[in-house]
Image (cartoon, rainbow, N blue to C red):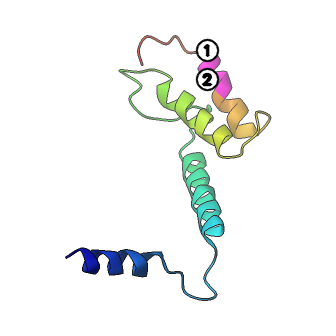
Amino acid sequence: MLPAVLSLLVAATQVPQGAPSLGSRVDRAIARGVEHVLSKQLQKGGFPGAEDDHPGGMTALCAFTLVKSGGKGSDVAVQRALRVVETTAFRST
């Protein structure tokens, strides 16, 4: 059983010749994730999700995600989200 599992692991980690590097694939996945997050931003700058229970929580999380994914604090989407976060009366996490 163990040799079969090991051979599957080896096969899964082998990259076909000419395929993009792991770093390139990771960068592309992050870029796609950022595009997805940005596509969910509302007109007023917030992000939807659990607003009744946790107002501002999704917006704060999305702003953090954008910055941790390479966005700058000066980016329009981040600025719009931060304006929403600054005016939110947080009452839960």
Question: x, y (%) of residue 86?
Answer: 64, 16
**Along the line of sight, the residue nearer the viewer: 45 or 78:** 78
Q: Is residue 5 visible?
A: yes
**How many residues crowd mark 1 within 10 Å: few (<14), some (14–19), many (20+)?**
few
Question: Looking at the image, can residue 43 be seen?
Answer: no
Q: Residue at x 52, y 35 (%)?
A: 47
Image quadrant in which the C terminus is located: top left
Q: Quadrant of the N terminus?
A: bottom left
Residue at mark 1 to residue at mark 2: CA–CA distance: 5 Å
From this view, report whether residue 82 is shown above or below residue 28: above
Foreground: 66 or 86? 66
Q: Are marks 1 and 2 in contact (CB under 8 Å)?
A: yes
Q: Which mark is residue 87?
A: 1
Q: Position of residue 25 (x, y in %)?
A: 60, 68
Amino acid carrying mark 2 in the image:
Val
Residue 91: x %, y % from top left: 43, 10
Task: Identify the secondary structure beneath mark 1.
Answer: loop
Residue carrying label 2: 84
Q: Is 45 drawn above or below residue 27 in the view shown?
A: above
32, 79: nearer the viewer: 32
